[in-house]
Image: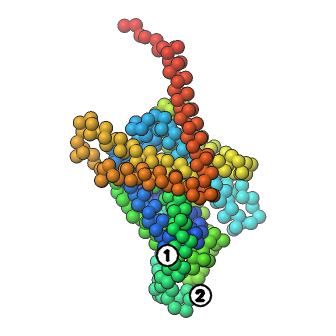
Amino acid sequence: MANATLKRKMEARHLLMISLGGVIGTGLFLSSGYTIHQAGPIGTILAYALGAVLVYLVMLCLGELAVAMPFTGSFHVYATKYIGPGTGFTVALLYWLTWTVALGSEFTAAGLIMQKWFPHTPTWLWSALFMIAIFIANALSVRFFAETEFWFSSIKVIAIIAFIVLGGAAIIGLLPISGYHHAPGLHNLVAGGIFPNGIKAVFTTMLTVNFAFSGTELIGVTAGETKDPGKNIPKAIHTTLLRLCLFFIGSIVVMAALIPYQKAGVSQSPFVLVFRQIGLPFAGDLMNFVVLTAILSAANSGLYASTRMLWSLANEKMIPARVAKTTKSGIPLLALSLSMLGGILALLSSVVAAETVYLVLVSISGLAVVIVWMAIALSQLNFRKQFLAEGHQLSELTFRTPGYPWIPLAAFILSFLSCVLIIFDPTQRPALFYMVPFIIACYVVYYVKEAIKKRRTQTNPAPTQKS
């Protein structure tokens, strides 16, 4: 181990693909059909549009903070400085838990996909192999991680663009599609009415949509390892949200136009269904490959994010400082190992205690990202206030959140409402019951730890040096 510093090796293209990679996962490729079935085509498009607006507001807040203070694990540091150290500690633990829990399910899903091609091999063997591969990708250097993520994400992006282009051609009649004797057009979008299951279904879907967009905040996590953050971070924020809207909403429009919402579900990926109807050869195998890269990409980004959050906690002296030690390549190897261990324990809990421990972990991690968004918005609100109070000028900020204070206020309130809306969904309501005690426990742990540290300092004061 050499020191506790990270290296700025990421370029604009890496930053863009890492943020896309963290967001575009199995939710779009597999679960989007279920979302359309629940809220109807127009309701789903509306929910994704509202979700995109919320995420964009949060990213505008993060942009000002990340450019002014480009730190790794940024929003934890901002929350510590501009809300309070207890909040910073809680935000970091929540975010670490989010990605660590996700790691377990992603490695399981990757193993299950491989079993479709190699039915006589055990799932755990593939899961273990992928764990080793993703660990190595993160352990070599940040440049190697970023390059791996760039290519993983590129495969997903190409698949989505192909889906939108081929699906769009089928919608207007340029490509034949089974089940239709004429161009389908956009008739299916309104065939069952604008809100076939009522407006309430749209708000319930919005919860799922917000979680689908989680991962864009990875831009903030990478700030400390990005070349020229003042230029590359704002560029990544604007282009990422624009492309996410295009990919998510474009895909939903194509699915809803070609698959009647009553038939959309989770029994088969809507991507596979549409590709097969168009007559694309090996549609199932091709999409399984794309889904596999989506899973590995999410695992890759997740391990990176959870590692950097632990490094940041150690760097801020909130957990033992040795966790922040880095290799000559600038990799915090102990933090990386602890995060991978957390992913393995989450995976084991999904097998051994699926109805107890794992259920609680998943519930907490599902809401955690929205809590992080609230912390980002409040941090920006307080940062700008303090920045001006210290006599600085707005012209000193390279990137400014527009419409202050309304943009951060809107981001905070909409994120808060996303949490409150869970009350109306019986399936997701338990998340609130688990989340509130967990947050209280985080604050208690932090302040008890600080009280013990303070007492030790008073009992054993540092020796004064003789002149």
In which quadrant of the rendered view does residue 107 lie? bottom right
Residue 7 vs residue 93, the one in the foreground: 93
- Where residue 398 appears, as percent x and y from the top left, is 28, 48
Residue 33 in view (yes/no): no
Residue 77 vs residue 328, the one in the foreground: 77
Question: Label 2 neighbourhood size at 10 Å, few (<14), some (14-19), many (20+)?
Answer: few
- Where residue 137 appears, as percent x and y from the top left, is 55, 51
Q: Residue furthest top?
A: 466
Q: Judge whether 275 appears above or below 229 on screen.
A: below
Considering only order in the chain, which callout, 2 or 1, is on the residue closer to the N terminus?
Answer: 2
Which image quarter holds the C terminus? top left
- Going by the numbered disc 1, the residue's amino acid type is Ile
Is label 1 in contact with label 2 (beta carbons under 8 Å)? no
Residue 130 vs residue 350, the one in the foreground: 350
- Where residue 224 appears, as percent x and y from the top left, is 41, 44
Q: Residue at x 50, y 42 (%)?
A: 91
Q: Judge whether 378 appears above or below 411 on screen.
A: above
Q: Residue at x 63, y 51 (%)?
A: 430
Q: Residue furthest right?
A: 120
Q: Judge whether 462 appears above or below 58 on screen.
A: above
C-alpha gap between disc 1 and disc 2: 23 Å
Is 241 on the left or on the right of 339, as rendered? left
- Where residue 171 appears, as percent x and y from the top left, is 48, 83
Question: Label 1 neighbourhood size at 10 Å, few (<14), some (14-19), many (20+)?
Answer: some
Q: Which residue is mark 2?
A: 179
Count of number-bearing discs: 2
Q: Which residue is mark 1?
A: 194
Q: Residue at x 38, y 53 (%)?
A: 410
Question: Which-is-in-front pick, marks 1 and 2?
Answer: 1
Residue 357 in view (yes/no): yes
- Going by the numbered disc 2, the residue's amino acid type is Gly
